Image (cartoon, grey):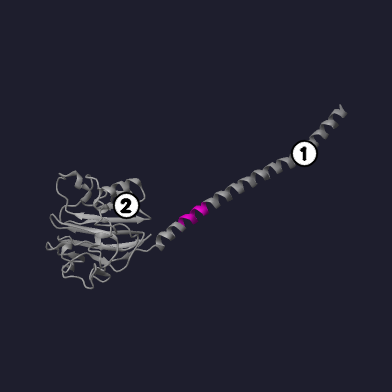
Amino acid sequence: MKLILVHYKKNVQMKRKITMPVVLKITSIIVLALLMSCTGREKSSAEKKESNVDADAVEQAVEWISLFDGETLDGWKRYNADEIGPLWTVEDGAIKCDGKGHGEGSPEDGGSLITLKTFGNFELELEWRISEGGNSGILYHVVEKPDYSHAYVTGPEFQVCDDPPVADDLSNLNKLAGSSYDMYAAPQTKKISPVMEWNTAKIVYMDGKVEHWLNGEKVVEFDESSEDFKERFDQSKWSTDEYPYWNTYKEGSIALQDHGAAVWYRNIRLRSL
């Protein structure tokens, strides 16, 4: 009996000697794993936060510039001319083209208004309104040369116009408001304000990828390198011998078109991309 008790006590002591360090070791491993897990999560969270900060910093670094001060035509000029004609004025904080039916055919009075600065990749925002039955446009990558008769000879156009109540000629849909003139039609379901009320427009150009926005909705999107663009170009007026330089420049001025109608533009701003 005594031998049994002695043997039992020795076993208990051995178990205590073995079990306690093992338990402590296992506990240490678990604690270490938890610490590493927490550290990893904190690092991941920190990296994500740093990434967001970097994105915000980039967004803030690309500053918007105002192309119109609301009072003067500083920073603008008439296309292929030294002085701005009398039809372009500032009225109630907006650039106004009186039009008077002259259009681009009589640049001695009006003609297109273009920025002195030129831009390549950009995002442009502005507001516009137009008179009843009026027609105008916002052009980009416009280049001046003595043998270029008008701004649209080189620059693609965001169409600005007072759309008819019903588009009876479906072939002309790409000549209505928001469209890329004679190339891509804005949908007939687009939101457009009544005549003489303000609309918002946005053009985004990035390495040949183009977006047109009208009143907060994207109405046109295309890629100049696509087969679709090439096919549309071949079927458009721009493919004729009359326009060999259309869309050939990837940097140029922003232009506001005089097409013979009264039209207003305001809150014009741009940022380079």
Residue 67 vertical placement versus 196 (above, below) = below
Q: Nearer the viewer, residue 32 or 69?
A: 69
Identity of the residue furthest to the right in this view: 3
In percent of the image, x 57 and y 48: which residue is there? Answer: 38
Q: In terms of image quadrants, where is residue 104?
A: bottom left
Q: Which residues are magenta?
A: 45-53
For mark 1, give the secondary structure: helix
Query: On the image, which quarter does residue 195 sit in?
Result: bottom left
Q: Is residue 51 magenta?
A: yes
Q: Quadrant of the N terminus?
A: top right
Image position, residue 59 (x, y; %): 40, 59
Secondary element under disc 2, as helix, strand or loop, is: strand
- Tell which tag, 1 or 2, sits nearer the viewer: 2
Residue at label 1? 18
Q: Earlier in the sequence, mark 1 or mark 2?
A: 1
Q: Residue at x 19, y 52 (%)?
A: 193
Location of residue 172 in the rendering, given as x and y in whole percent from the top left corner = 19, 47
Can the viewer see residue 106 in this picture? Answer: yes
Amino acid type, mark 1 = Ile
Give the residue type at disc 2. Answer: Glu
Residue 252 place in picture, x, y as percent: 32, 63
Left or right: 64 in relation to 163 = right
Quick check: is 31 in the magenta stretch? no
Q: Quadrant of the C terminus?
A: bottom left
Q: Residue furthest bottom?
A: 82
Q: Which residue is mark 2?
A: 211
In this rendering, position of residue 261 left or right of residue 239: left
Marks 1 and 2, how far apart at CA: 73 Å
